[in-house]
Amino acid sequence: MNPLIFLLMGSSGSKIGSIGTGAPRNVLVNWQANREKSVNSTGGGYKACYGINPSYQAATAVCSTVPYASGATAPTSATLSIPSGSQVYIYVLGYSSLNPNGTPAATPTTVQVN
């Protein structure tokens, strides 16, 4: 599954653009739950990240960890604070106690800028 989407922040219908100027913007990212048991149990969860490269690069990505807490699945949303003027890619990685670095887990389904 492709874990990347480009933020749609340009003019209407545009697939290229930036968040704008001013203070960092909060970007709410939602994705479909991964069905892997290890992601949806103790020690698992997701990493919602952003970076400037179309392919995920751990050294330059900024991530927010979304750990499994309880229930059938780990939470499927996160808010990222992205600097103004940024053009970024969003990555969602599933992680577990067996794979703490994570692997591509889901394609974000919605991105909302506040």
Image: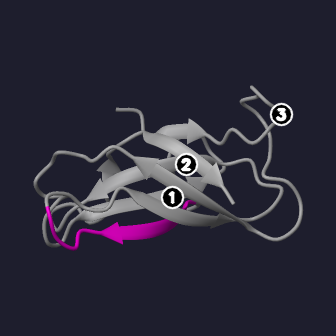
- Please count the marks in the image: 3
Q: Is residue 62 magenta?
A: yes
* Mark nearer the viewer, 3 or 2: 3
In the image, is 49 to the left or to the right of 36? Answer: right
Q: How is the image coloured?
A: one colour
Q: Are discs 1 and 3 less than 8 Å apart at CB?
A: no
Checking the image for residue 90, the label placed there is: 2
Q: Is residue 8 above or below residue 78?
A: above
Amino acid under label 1? Answer: Cys
Residue 67, how many percent across, how many down? 29, 70
Marks 3 and 2 sit apart, C-alpha to C-alpha, by 19 Å
Mark 3 — residue? 11
Q: Residue at x 42, y 58 (%)?
A: 77
Q: Are discs 2 and 1 less than 8 Å apart at CB?
A: yes
Q: Earlier in the sequence, mark 3 or mark 2?
A: 3
Q: Is residue 2 above or below residue 114?
A: above
Marks 1 and 3 sit apart, C-alpha to C-alpha, by 24 Å
Q: Determine the secondary structure under disc 3.
A: loop
Q: Earlier in the sequence, mark 1 or mark 3?
A: 3
Give 73 or 38, whichever is nearer the viewer.
Answer: 73
Q: Which residues are magenta?
A: 61-71
| Mark 1 neighbour density, 10 Å: few (under 14) some (14–19) many (20 or more) | many
Marks 2 and 1 sit apart, C-alpha to C-alpha, by 6 Å
Checking the image for residue 49, the label placed there is: 1
